[in-house]
Amino acid sequence: MGNRLSKIYTRTGDQGTTGLGDGTRVEKDNVRVEAYGTTDELNAVLGMILADPRLSEPLRSWLLEIQHDLFDLGAELCVPGHRVLTEAFVQRLEQHIDTLNQDLPPLKEFILPGGSRAAADCHLARTVCRRAERRLLTLHRAEPVNEWGLKYLNRLSDLLFVVARVLARADGGTEVMWNRQRFES
């Protein structure tokens, strides 16, 4: 493969444009760039979660695999017309959700982000994932994108919610439930 990034700065973006993977130059706030930029941001937040040495298996392996998936999604978005994600990617997330959710108690109230540092980081990842999904939907309204990318982000936010629940309970922690009656006498 050689040295792909032998020079980090190119100065080609100094005027507010960036290059897509197909060589096209677009404004840095282009909806496509917003979509893959937010996907990259999500990947970075997952990296924060993975930096916690207490993260157990299989969560560590699953989140690392998801980071690779998000890089693939970013590549799809950077190169118009490129396709990587398939139904199998979404099905894998659903299997992870089912595996983790079977040991969790049913929800009776909304959960506030928190419970532990790792759980809070996972809730942050979930909200960034939802924003990435919105950015991808905005792009999809302007031009067709791989539908599996949209489905993947939707399912990933569900998985991150369940992972946050698991992490909040790890090491004897608890989930923080929303108290809607807190001001009632």
Image: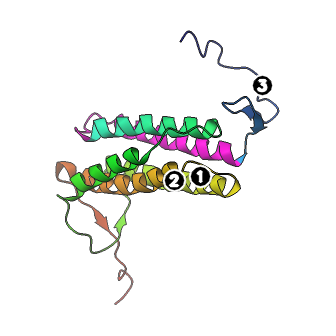
Q: Position of residue 171 (x, y in %)?
A: 18, 48
CA distance for labels 2 and 3: 31 Å
Assess whether mark 2 and mark 1 are in contact (beta carbons under 8 angstroms).
yes
Secondary-structure class at tag 3: loop
Which residue occupies 37% across, 45% down? Answer: 88
Q: Nearer the viewer, mark 1 or mark 3?
A: 1
Q: Amino acid at mark 3?
A: Thr
Does 108 sit above or below residue 162? below
Residue 159 in view in this figure: yes
The one nearer the camera, 141 or 43, is 141
Quarter of the image holding residue 28?
top right
Q: Earlier in the sequence, mark 1 or mark 2?
A: 1
The span picked out in magenta is: 31-58
Helix, strand or loop: magenta stretch: helix
Disc 2 target residue? 150
Q: Position of residue 25 (x, y in %)?
A: 77, 34
Disc 1 target residue? 136
Disc 3 target residue? 12
Specify few, some or many for label 2: CA neighbours under 10 Å numbering under 14, 14-19, or 20 or more: many
Q: Amino acid at mark 1?
A: Leu
Does 12 sit above or below residue 42? above
**Is residue 2 found left or right of 80 in the rendered image?**
left
Q: Position of residue 77 (x, y in %)?
A: 60, 41
Q: Amino acid at mark 2?
A: Leu
Quarter of the image holding residue 108?
bottom left
CA distance for labels 1 and 3: 25 Å
Residue 55 lies in the magenta stretch:
yes
